[in-house]
Image (tube, helix red, strand yellow):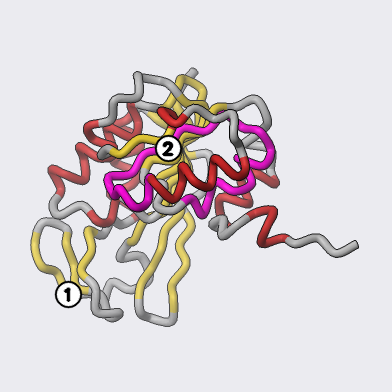
Amino acid sequence: MTTDLAALFGGIDVYLFDQLLRGRIAPGMRVLDAGCGRGRNLVFLFREGYEVLALDPDPAAVAAVRELARRLAPVLPEANVRRERVDASTFPDACADVVISNAVLHFAPDEETFLAMLRGTWRLLAPGGLLFCRLASTIGIERLVRPLGGRRFALPDGTDRFLVDEAYLLERTTELGGRLLDPIKTTVVQGQRAMTTWVVGKAG
């Protein structure tokens, strides 16, 4: 029998998949995708019956995730998927055991917005919970990016992003009162961009 991995796992981020494999995201946990897009990271969670919460400001993304839930998790309340920004979410404080922020924070236009988005994300995480964050950084491509001011940079791939570095993430970890669950890891994509994985635990 051939297993259709794409049907089972969708387009899940490989570093998020690693957290699943290591048992850090386990059945019975409530998982919130803060910037869910069209649900690439939710297929497996829906199939396996996790309690999923999701938000995104894009109405097309919210519609796509609600449709995905109707197919894979028909008992999920529609109100679990909301059209809203993470810094203005109506979900209650500490509502999730795991919060996913995948390719979201680097779209902040400035540091004030970045910090508001980060704090809004952290607010949703329950004590003892795990924040999984993937975001663009300068790590490994410091000489290839052009500063535009306010931690925004022009990247070789032609995009502009809010970019962090290791020191900045360590400062934010301390500021949040969190602790690193994994070393900060970065993938450099052929000198065009760098994506960093930041996994933080919240004190129980």
Q: Is residue 58 magenta?
A: yes
Q: Does residue 155 sit above or below 118 in this rendering?
A: below
Q: Position of residue 3 (x, y in %)?
A: 81, 60
Q: Which mark is residue 54?
A: 2
**Region rendered in magenta:** 39-62
As rendered, which of 90 and 189 lies closer to the eye? Answer: 90
Q: Is residue 179 visible?
A: no
Q: Is residue 126 visible?
A: yes
- Tell me whether the residue at label 1 lies in contact with that at label 2, contact meaning CB atoms closer than 8 angstroms: no
The amino acid pointed to by label 2 is Ala
Q: Is residue 133 left or right of residue 175?
A: right
Looking at the rendering, which quadrant does residue 193 occupy?
Answer: bottom left
Name which residue lies at 46% across and 32% down. 53
Q: Which mark is residue 146?
A: 1
Q: Position of residue 146 (x, y in %)?
A: 17, 75
Q: Is residue 20 left or right of residue 107?
A: right
As rendered, which of 50 and 114 lies closer to the eye? Answer: 50
Is disc 2 placed on a helix, strand or loop?
Answer: strand
Q: Position of residue 18 (x, y in %)?
A: 63, 51
Is disc 1 placed on a helix, strand or loop?
Answer: strand
